[in-house]
Each structure stands twice: as structure tokens, then as C-alpha cells.
């Protein structure tokens, strides 16, 4: 699990000319200026003002994405020229196009969750796991057809 750092213009008891205070919090996301609202990384610089004061779309933050974004909001793909938002890693979807956001050695993700079926490799949108709703739907999603022919697990 990643960490995020939050930046506030000044802390109580400090003057406006003081250096910003940075503190690490064990959660990936963007903390709005109200210090209560946290939005997912992919909600930053997406053209929609999610924070009350619109700081998630601030020009200084969004001027040269991904370089202008804080590092904890960005994840790199197997191709060094490609990137995704950090909350898109290990979400079961092939966001990078080469599955590097879902598979080793670039990314280490937990095993498939309860709503997912594990395949040795998949086609198209998914990488290592497919949603269970696609199990036995008469369409090949796993390279070995296991989701169509294997006995269901627990």
C-alpha cells in the first residue's frame, strides 16, 4: 500500500511565510484543502473539480501531467514512456496495455479477490484475474479457456 504526502500552505501557529508542512499518511489519494476530503489519484487533473475549492484541478498541479503531479499519485508502466494514476494499479484492469500494472515484475498485486476468477493469462481488458460474472459466459477470456471448462472453486 502506498503512502501520500499532503501539503498545506501553513499550519496553525505559523505565519503565512513559513515553509509548507508535509506529512505522510498511509493512504494513496489527494487531500483537499478542507483536510477532510480525500479523492482518488485518478480524480486529480481529470477536468472535474472534485474538491470544494477546485484545488484538484489547479493549474500548477495540472500544467505538465504527469511530471507536475506528486510522485505518490503516479505509477509507471513496463514501458517507461507510459504511466497511470496510482489507484489504477492492481485494480484488475489492464490500464497499461501490457499488464505491467497488474503483474510482476513491475507490480506486485494480491491474489484475485472473492469476486474474481484466476487465469494463467487473459485476453483484452484483464490480465491475471477476470470478474466472476464472466465465468461460464460462453466467451473466451482466459487463454486456456479455464473459465469456461474448469470446475468452480470455493
Image (cartoon, helix red, strand yellow):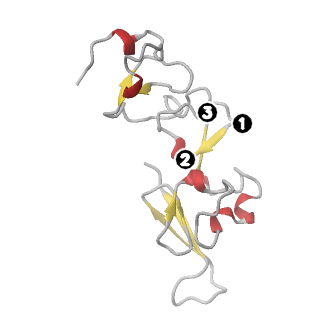
Most distant residue in the right direction? 63
Seen at 35% across and 9% down, the residue is 149
x then y, percent, for residue 150: 31, 11
Disc number lying in front (1 or 3): 3
Q: Disc 1 and disc 3: Cα gap in Å?
A: 11 Å
Judging from the image, what secondary structure is the residue with disc 2 in?
helix
Residue 56 against residue 111 in the figure, above or below: below
Q: Which mark is residue 81?
A: 1
Most distant residue in the left direction? 154
Q: Label 2, on which residue?
A: 86
Query: In the rendered structure, are the residues bearing label 2 and label 1 in contact, judged by CB atoms less than 8 Å apart?
Result: no
Position of the C terminus by quadrant: top left
Seen at 64% across and 68% down, the residue is 55
Q: Residues within 10 Å of mark 2 (few under 14, many from 20)?
A: many
Q: Which mark is residue 96?
A: 3
Judging from the image, what secondary structure is the residue with disc 1 in?
loop
Q: Is residue 82 left or right of residue 25?
A: right
Residue 8 against residue 4 in the figure, above or below: below
Residue 26 placement: quadrant = bottom left
Amino acid at each position: 500500500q502506498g503512502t501520500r504526502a499532503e501539503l498545506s500552505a501553513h499550519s496553525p501557529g505559523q505565519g503565512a511565510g513559513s515553509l509548507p508542512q508535509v506529512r505522510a499518511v498511509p493512504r494513496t489519494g489527494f487531500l483537499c484543502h478542507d483536510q477532510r476530503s480525500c479523492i482518488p489519484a485518478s480524480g486529480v487533473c481529470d477536468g472535474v473539480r472534485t474538491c470544494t475549492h477546485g484545488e484538484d484541478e489547479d493549474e500548477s498541479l495540472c500544467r505538465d501531467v504527469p511530471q507536475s503531479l506528486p510522485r505518490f499519485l503516479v505509477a509507471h508502466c513496463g514501458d517507461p514512456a507510459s504511466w497511470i494514476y496510482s489507484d489504477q494499479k492492481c485494480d484488475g484492469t489492464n490500464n497499461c496495455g501490457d499488464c505491467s500494472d497488474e503483474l510482476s515484475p513491475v507490480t506486485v498485486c494480491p491474489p484475485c479477490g472473492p469476486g474474481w476468477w484466476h487465469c494463467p493469462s487473459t485476453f483484452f481488458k484483464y490480465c491475471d484475474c477476470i470478474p466472476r460474472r464472466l465465468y461460464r459466459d460462453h466467451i473466451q477470456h482466459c487463454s486456456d479457456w479455464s473459465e469456461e471448462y474448469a470446475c468452480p472453486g470455493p
